[in-house]
Image (tube, rainbow, N blue to C red):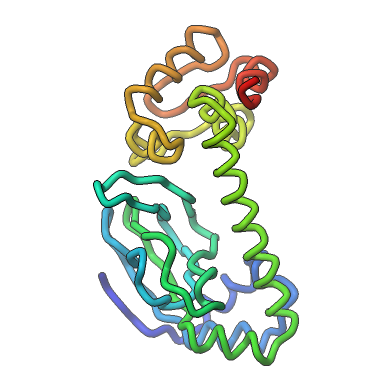
Amino acid sequence: MAEQQTTGGDLLTALQQLPFFAGLETQLIQRFAHAAIRRVYEPGAIIFLEGDDSPGLYYVQSGWVKAVSMSAEGREQILHFLKAGEVFGGMTVFVSQPMPATAIALEPTELWQLPRNVVRQALLTEPQFALRVIEYMGERINDLVALVADLSLRSVTARLARQLMENAVDDVVQRQRWATQAEMAARLGAAPDVVNRALRSLSDAGLIELSRQQIRILDRVGLADKALPDR
């Protein structure tokens, strides 16, 4: 992992364009940009471990990151995939709790770390930023509630159908190089062979078309029906 302090110029522009920082005073964003530390990770590198103290808030400049919870046996449950332009690591910046998940780079990834002390100081002095953080935490909690509901109320096929519909752009889900069936299974909370059977069943039903680079939705209405909770 490479580390470098920033002069803040290019990063300031990037942060101003993020929804997370939209509407905040330029002076505050400048403070973040000048304090930020650039970090570069190779595929498979650990950014932080579940149980670590919070190092700060992260902005993904390029690459992909997964946030996972791991069992003692090494089984993964993927909580989030994070792409360029997203912010993560915020839940424990604002409370004195250890990190609830492990973050791992999925491909060559460049991050900017906003140190915890700088972020916490901004919370005390900038009400607009504090409100933005509350909104961020609410969104993350909603994501986790939806994940729990998926795992408890939907079959693997239903969870897969729902995920495909959420991730599709113009009815196409692009398959990243790292998006193996093992990664998909960890996101769905299932074994890879079970996910493979679910993919094949949707394909055989004429709802999706599979290729190495993408998954195309052929019948959105039919796929939506498959995504319904178990009845």
Q: Which quadrant would residue 191 be assigned to in this image? A: top left
Relative side of 102 to 140, left or right: left
Number of residue marks: 0
- Counting from the top left corner in percent of width and height, residue 86 is at 54, 60
> Up-down: is 137 above or below 72?
below
Relative side of 219 to 160, left or right: right
Q: Nearer the viewer, residue 144 or 66?
A: 144
Q: Residue at x 68, y 92 (%)?
A: 125
Image quadrant occupied by the N terminus: bottom left
Q: Which residue is drawn at 70% across and 66% down?
A: 135
- Counting from the top left corner in percent of width and height, residue 43 is at 28, 54
Q: Which of 144 and 161 is in front in this view?
A: 144
- Counting from the top left corner in percent of width and height, residue 140 is at 60, 58
- Counting from the top left corner in percent of width and height, residue 2 is at 27, 73
> Up-down: is 166 above or below 212?
below
Q: Which residue is drawn at 55% across and 43% down?
A: 148
> Up-down: is 139 above or below 149?
below
> Up-down: is 162 above or below 8?
above
Relative side of 101 to 138, left or right: left
Image quadrant occupied by the C terminus: top right
